[in-house]
Amino acid sequence: MPHTLAKPSHSELIVKKSRFIGCVQPVADRVAAHKVVADLWAAHPTATHVCWALMAGGHSAAVDDGEPSGTAGRPMLDVLRHQDLERVLATVVRYYGGVNLGAGGLVRAYTDAVAQALLQAEKIAIVKKQTLKCAVPYPLEGRVRRELEAAGATLGNVHHGEGVELEFVLPVHAAPALVARLNDAGSGQLAWIDATQASPPD
């Protein structure tokens, strides 16, 4: 199960006089990541590099920012991927110390900066949610509400007309069992507003 982070977590390394300031934090997309990087440059105007990696589905990115290709952004991204993180940005601000580290040394330094920041990070499981909507006769409304509460579903819009239409959200993995229970409880009187909603998405 993929995880994100509760809040930013930091690290700092000194490798052969170069200073590496690492951070991992939750972000939604590449736009948010660019803002974080811009803020880092504003906070560290004399830094040599601000390298970063973003794990966020189609928004993922790996940026070496002037370091030799493949020595910063990609290793940082690999750390996020190996820990099954999603919607997480890793940044490393480097101040060059006058000693070249070589490609292997750079990969180790950027990898370690991210890995050490993650050691202190609080991870939160990302639970995929699904929205369902059904219509029931008035006598069944109470039973349906009780089933929703028992399943941990969040009730949304409720419309009272000829019958009762209830919209609710719950974790995808819990949807099949709840759909089955509601169908049984409804004894043929419960109707799904969108039939495709009664099955989890692929």
Image (cartoon, grey):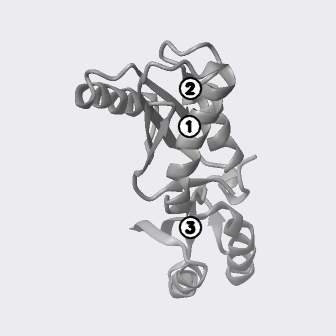
Q: Amino acid at mark 1?
A: Ala
Residue nearest the observer in this picture, 82 or 104 = 104
| Mark found first going from the N terminus, 2 or 3 | 2
Q: Which residue is mark 2?
A: 61
Q: Report, in whole angstroms, how far the alpha carbon at label 3 lies from the one at label 1.
A: 36 Å
Give the foreground label among 2 and 1.
2
In this rendering, would 46 be left or right of 86? left
Q: Does residue 163 appear in the picture of this structure?
A: no
Instruction: State whether residue 93 is above or below residue 160.
Output: above
Q: Could you say which quadrant of the image residue 197 lies in?
A: bottom right
Q: Are marks 2 and 3 in contact (CB under 8 Å)?
A: no
Secondary element at tag 1:
loop
Give the foreground label among 3 and 1.
1
Instruction: State whether residue 161 is above or below residue 5.
Output: below
* Location of residue 81 in the rendering, given as x and y in whole percent from the top left corner: 67, 41
Q: Does residue 5 appear in the picture of this structure?
A: yes
Q: Which residue is mark 3?
A: 135
Which circle marks residue 56 in the picture?
1
Mark 1 surroundings within 10 Å by alpha-carbon count, few (fewer than 14), some (14 through 19), many (20 or more):
some
| Mark found first going from the N terminus, 3 or 1 | 1
Residue nearest the observer in this picture, 127 or 30 = 30
| Mark found first going from the N terminus, 2 or 1 | 1
Give me the residue at 67% from left, 49% from top: 84
Q: Report, in whole angstroms, how far the alpha carbon at label 2 lies from the one at label 3.
A: 44 Å
Mark 2 surroundings within 10 Å by alpha-carbon count, few (fewer than 14), some (14 through 19), many (20 or more):
some
Q: Are marks 3 and 1 in contact (CB under 8 Å)?
A: no
